Amino acid sequence: MEKTMEEQLPVMAVEHDCILSKQGDVTIVFKAELPEIFTLSDQEYEAFHQSWIKALKVLPKFCVFHKQDWFLESAYKANFSSEDSSFLTRSSERFFNERPFLDHSCYIMLTKKPAGRRNATSLFSNLLRSSIVPEETLKPQLLQDFVDTCGQFKRIMEDSGFIKLERLQDESLRSESRRIGLVEKYCFLSEQENSFVFKDIRFDEGLAVGDKHCQLFTLGDAADLPGLCGSRINFDRYSTDKTKFSIGFASTLGQLLSCNHIYNQYIFIEDAQKTIQKLESKRLRLQSLSAYSRENMIARDATNDFLNEAVSQQRLPVKAHFNILAWSTDKEDLKEIKNKVSSALAQMDAAAKQETVGAPQIYWAGMAGNAADFPMNDTFDTFTEQAVCFLNMETGYKSSLSPCGIRLGDRLTGKPVHVDISDEPVKMGICTNRNKFILGPSGSGKSFFTNHMVRSYYEQGTHIVLVDVGHSYKGLCDMVNGYYFTYDEKNPIRFNPFYISEGDSLDTEKKESIKTLLLALWKKDDETFNRSEYVALSNALQLYYEKLDNNAEIFPCFNSFYDFLKEDFISILEGDKVKEKDFDVNNFLYVLRPYYKGGEFDYLLNATENLDLLKERFIVFELDNIKDHPILFPVVTIIIMEVFINKMRKLKGIRKMILIEEAWKALMKEGFANYIKYLFKTVRKFFGEAIVVTQEVEDIISSPVVKQAIINNSDCKILLDQSKYQNKFDQIQELLGLTDKEKALVLSVNKANDPARKYKEVFISLGGMLSKVYRTEVSLEEYLSYTTEESEKVKMNAYAKKFGGDIKKGIAAMAQDMRNGIK
């Protein structure tokens, strides 16, 4: 027998931002924003659990709490419309295009039943019969009282800090202007808001909505429930011998159940006194019958225990029901869906009951505004404390709206998420600075992650200075045409500290850095300089730059400065009667002779290319070959300091980043320690961030500078796979000030990676208040740009040569060949 939807629809109207049913039930709907999965600790789950209990206790009697979580199979849609996107960004978009994930939305519906309304059952459902609106519903004061109560519910939940609730307006509840409303969305199981395909609902051969074949699994009988329930359970995939990883008790029915499904959670608040009276009567009946059967005796004891708990612990008795509505367009998938749902319930120690006969009435009651017509014969008696355990507490990872950040992956599916680890945490008050401390053993993907982070920041306009040992950033530097300063015999390292680029000026800082450099080359560490020597160098620089202003043909470099000292400055000193003991110019010229043309190090300070260090946005100092050199290393150290300080002070409103890789250990012995201390404390005032990368825990402990200045002034801590330190992680935890929740997260990194995909995970802690683990999953083109594998770098350079040295074309060709299986 067919009926029209208009006849059967239990909703009479949507007005005053409420849904009114034909039986007089009034429903207020909230859209909820839940915490992200894998981010809550044991204590936070318990606090969230208590907030639900408090909020439910303010609801009036004859009220229905209906929480509906939609989990829809979706796919990431790439954005190719941006014209200014880079080669690597486009590669990333292509790589993630159509990446499947579960899209989650959550609605909380609070329904007030009119007093005296008869409870629905499977036999007396409004799917089977109609009714008239009771008079009570027409009283405006009753509506206002209910709205006020719902406001209290919202306030209690939001005050917990875990959830945001937004009350849905009329236009969101009903369909209009090519956007489907909540009522129709459920009726037709629409997966898109603009989907206006009307579908038949059939109950003859199971439940079917249009071409979707549905299965309904219920937790509506106390016999099917787990023996124990709580606010959280252990997630074995991410747990270790030392740590227990927590997820919500019902998480296996939510984000972890990978199929199209709706998880409906109902809690019915009845008249508590009447409920207890009914149970007392039941207990007395069972008492009198207990002598006839052991089942009656057990039932009597269970009823007695329930009543004792209700009275002694002031529990609120409620009725509850939970169900999963899962569907697929392919009937062949139903068996697999059944297995998935059964497995998810088994992880909670619950039994799955597949509804067939009562499925139509339960499905119908799931419609927004119709929860009051739920068949009460499919509910069980419990307390709010236990009922709340079965609520889904979590959602999927969310992207930041900030323009700054890096692309990482959601932990479950790898869905790309935009993560801001610099600006947003500072605006939210979670962090006070943008500095970062990165710890990851060799082979953990540390350089790979830093390459990815640095490239993201570069594309967002950041000026980046990298200090490296190991050539980790050569590929990326070539890709963006940055400056790469390194040393080898054929092409030694070259600088020009005397060159002043366009837009720059000879200010005090510039003069001081050149003087520091000249003094470092002239005097040994244990030699002091006197005041007159310092003044003489200041005068020499001032006069040298005045000469340059008047003689544009002279190129500023150490050679021309040396010529100036010999040809002009000696006579000036003689004219000023400067004695040798005050400034021994001949000694100065003799000691600095190796840096002048024809000398051993004549290349070092006379560069004619890569000069504009202030405006160049990507600069790498590769120190591997010179870190033990007594002459070159101190010079490079001073140049690095000068370059970043210059950027820091002169580039107003532009983000600056200095990333010091393992090189910091070598730099410490050259008086760089105080500079690092200064940087980490003051760089935030200049819209900058300082980052130190290390791989050994012992390095942190042995260096007081790292231990105090760096760690204490780095609000963002990034850790890669620490499994090899699992047994001595307490030491790391104490040094970095990590919480037990963060410890569990760190030790879960790479514990259960998807074997079908190539990626590593990374832990990020922001101020100790917001901690998550993400995937660092990238396209093949990005991988080839970041790789530190020597064989892959050699092959990539060979491909680039085929295209006249074009790195991008070389990478694109190599990636395509690798995808086609050509080695």
Image: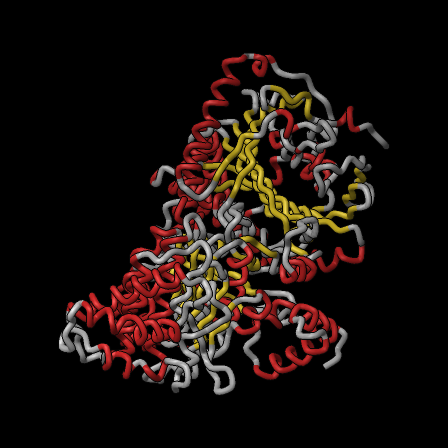
- Image coordinates for residue 231, horizontal then vertical, percent: 44, 51
For residue 277, side relative to residue 792 (left or right): left
Q: Let me know if residue 255 appears in the view.
A: yes
- Image coordinates for residue 51, horizontal then vertical, percent: 41, 40
519 relative to 488, above or below? above
Which sits in the foreground, 759 or 783? 783
The N terminus sits in image quarter: top right
- Image coordinates for residue 472, horizontal then vertical, percent: 50, 75
* Residue farthest along the right direction in this orientation: 1
Q: What residue is shown at x 42% (from left), y 65% (from top)?
A: 499
Which sits in the foreground, 478 or 557? 557
The C terminus sits in image quarter: bottom right
For residue 246, side relative to residue 363 (left or right): left
Q: What residue is shown at x 61% (from left), y 59% (from top)?
A: 413
Q: What residue is shown at x 53% (from left), y 51% (from top)?
A: 250
Number of numbered labels in the structure image: 0
For residue 523, side relative to residue 759 (left or right): left
- Image coordinates for residue 754, horizontal then vertical, percent: 61, 68
Tell me which colouring the rendered structure shows.
secondary structure
Q: Let me know if residue 291 appears in the view.
A: no
The image quarter in which residue 252 lies: bottom right
Which sits in the foreground, 361 or 531? 531
64 relative to 632, above or below? above
